[in-house]
Amino acid sequence: MLGTCQAVPGTGWHVPCTDSGSTLRPVTLFGSHTISNDSPLVVVAVERAVDRSPDGLTYALPPKLADLPEGARVEVPLGRGETPTAGWIVERLPAGETNGIPRDKIKHVLAQDDSGVVLPGELVQFARWMSAYYACPIGMTLASILPAAVRKAIGRVERTLVDFAPAPEGSTASTALPKITKRQQHALDVLAKLPRPIEIADLAREASYSSTEPLKRLVASGHLIAVKKTAVEAGFIARAGNTAPAPQPTLEQQSAIDAISRDLGSFKQHLVFGVTGSGKTEIYIRAIEQ
């Protein structure tokens, strides 16, 4: 029968007390890392100022991530504390190859990064060259290549925009749609005075609603339509609905715009000369609009 176990200081072992004596056996603090023989292995370059030459550290892909390609951004356990750390798959090892590391020492990749980003092979090769030339860990190099906004998945965050639903063909909204409450009609009256489309949360706030549920019911009843846009698109649409009128070009600006416009459709060179703040950008914008 096993009794109370006692740790052996500084060894990472413990002594299970038994009726017949004591034996030593190792204890893992973080659970088993047993990797099956058919688990695909990858080399991951972590985004830290440490690396294992030449590319990174060896990890195993769990079944749900077995098809991740080179260039994918992932999260892996790093160090004795198994700290979740971002990194990049820079190589998929051939079957049976372990980079000389016992399989029982290899840990699993935790997850694919939420951004879902996968860098093309050309950028991975470019990062390898930069890493060698500047003596910088390749993981840090890859991290500098990917914009912070992409790493944070800013463009993948979705927002819901609402607008009036078009009246069904051959009928009016009053006859084709179900009746609504005065409180719901208040939301429609508020929407009529605002730039559209508008984020559903913003409309709820303008209508003094504590939640968006009443607006969702208006969508379900057909009074409103809702579309999902990324945060970047939604922000652009919101700004477009509140855009100030374009400024009137000065005589010098208009002269430059006219000269460029005459040459549109053919290859010509124009030099726009002016100090900072003189209005060159407005000339570029007008030329692009044409």
Image: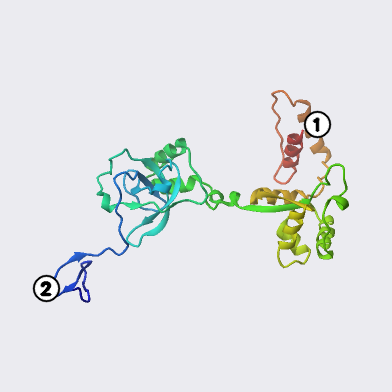
Q: Position of residue 253 (x, y in %)?
A: 79, 38
238 over 80 or under it: above or below: above
57 over 24 or under it: above or below: above
CA distance for labels 2 and 1? 100 Å
Q: Is residue 164 left or right of residue 68?
A: right
Q: Is residue 228 visible?
A: yes
Q: Quadrant of residue 90?
A: top left
What residue type is disc 1 on?
A: Asp
Q: State the residue in front, 227 or 275.
A: 227
Q: Is residue 240 left or right of residue 34?
A: right
Which comes before the other along the chain, label 2 or label 1?
A: 2
Q: Residue at x 76, y 30 (%)?
A: 260
Q: Position of residue 108 (x, y in %)?
A: 36, 52
Nearest to viewer (mark 2 / mark 1): 2
Q: Report helix, strand or loop for mark 2.
A: loop
Q: Residue at x 70, y 25 (%)?
A: 268
Quarter of the picture containing the N terminus is bottom left
For mark 1, what is the residue? Answer: 258
Residue furthest out toward the left: 20
What residue type is disc 2 on?
A: Ser
Q: Residues within 10 Å of mark 2 (few under 14, many from 20)?
A: few
Q: Quadrant of residue 54?
A: top left
Residue furthest out toward the top: 266
Q: Residue at x 39, y 47 (%)?
A: 63
Q: Quadrant of residue 187?
A: bottom right
For mark 2, what is the residue? Answer: 20
Q: Is residue 136 visible?
A: no
Q: Residue at x 77, y 37 (%)?
A: 286
Q: State the residue in front, 281 or 219.
A: 219
